[in-house]
Image (cartoon, helix red, strand yellow):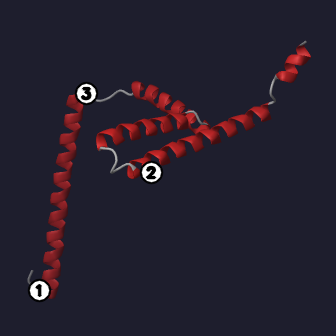
Amino acid sequence: MSSEIEKQKASPTEELKFKKANSALLWIVAVILVLVAAVGNIYFKDQFAAFVRVPVMAVLLLLALAAAAFTNQGTTARTFLKESRIELRKIIWPTRQEASQTTLIVMGVTVVVSLVLWGLDSLIVSLINFITNLRF
C-alpha cells in the first residue's frame, strides 16, 4: 500500500514543471487582461461614457494584478512586501521635535555653505578682474 502512495506522489521535477507552467499561464492571463482593458478602453471610447469604462478597466487591471500575484515572481514579491512591513515596524522614527531640529540644522548649514561659496566666487572674480583689468 505504501508503494502505491509513493507512485501517486509527483516527483520534484514534475512539480517544478507544473509550477513553471502554471506561472507562465498566469502571466499570459495577466497580460491578456491588461491588453483587453487598454484596447477595450480605446475601442469603446465613443460607445460608453468614462464613468462606465473606468470601473470596468479598474476591475480588469485588478484581476490582472491578482493573476500576477499568484505567479512565482508574484509570490516572491508578496513575501518581500510582508517582510518589509515587518521591518518598517521595527524602525524607531524620530520625534517631531528631532525632525524639526534636524531640518533647521540642514537649512542653517546650507545658508552658511552658500555664503562661503558666494564669497569665494566674488574673491575669484575680483582676482581675475585685477589681473585682466576688466570690469564686471
Check disc 2: other Cα within 10 Å, few if <14, some if 14-19, many if 20+. Answer: few
At a point 61% along the width and 36% down the height, the residue shown is 72
Question: What's under tag 3, amino acid-wise?
Answer: Thr
In the foreground, 110 or 54: 54
Tell which tag, 3 or 1, sits nearer the viewer.
3
Asked if the residue under mark 1 is in contact with the one under mark 2, i.e. CB atoms within 8 Å, the reply is no
Q: Which residue is mark 2?
A: 39
Q: Earlier in the sequence, mark 2 or mark 1?
A: 2
> Is residue 131 rendered to the left or right of residue 40?
left
Q: CA distance from mark 3 to mark 1?
A: 54 Å
Q: Position of residue 28 (x, y in %)?
A: 59, 44
Q: Name the outermost residue toward the left.
A: 135
Residue 123 circle label: none
Looking at the image, residue 15 sits to the left or right of residue 65; the answer is right
Residue 118, position as x, y percentages in the image: 16, 64
Q: Residue at x 15, y 76 (%)?
A: 125
SS for dot 2: helix
Whole-percent x, y for residue 106 in the image: 22, 45
Amino acid type assigned to the residue bearing label 1 in the image: Leu
Q: Which residue is mark 3?
A: 95
Above or below, comparing residue 117 to residue 53 in the picture? below
Quadrant position of the N terminus in the picture: top right
The local crowd at label 1, few if under 14, some if 14 to 19, many if 20 or more residues have their Cα within 10 Å, is few
Task: State the separation of the CA atoms marked 3 and 2.
Answer: 49 Å
Q: For the residue labelled by badge 3, is the local secondary structure a helix, a strand or a loop?
A: loop
* Residue at which label 1 appears: 134
Residue in view at x 50 percent, y 29 percent: 83
Q: Amino acid at mark 2?
A: Val
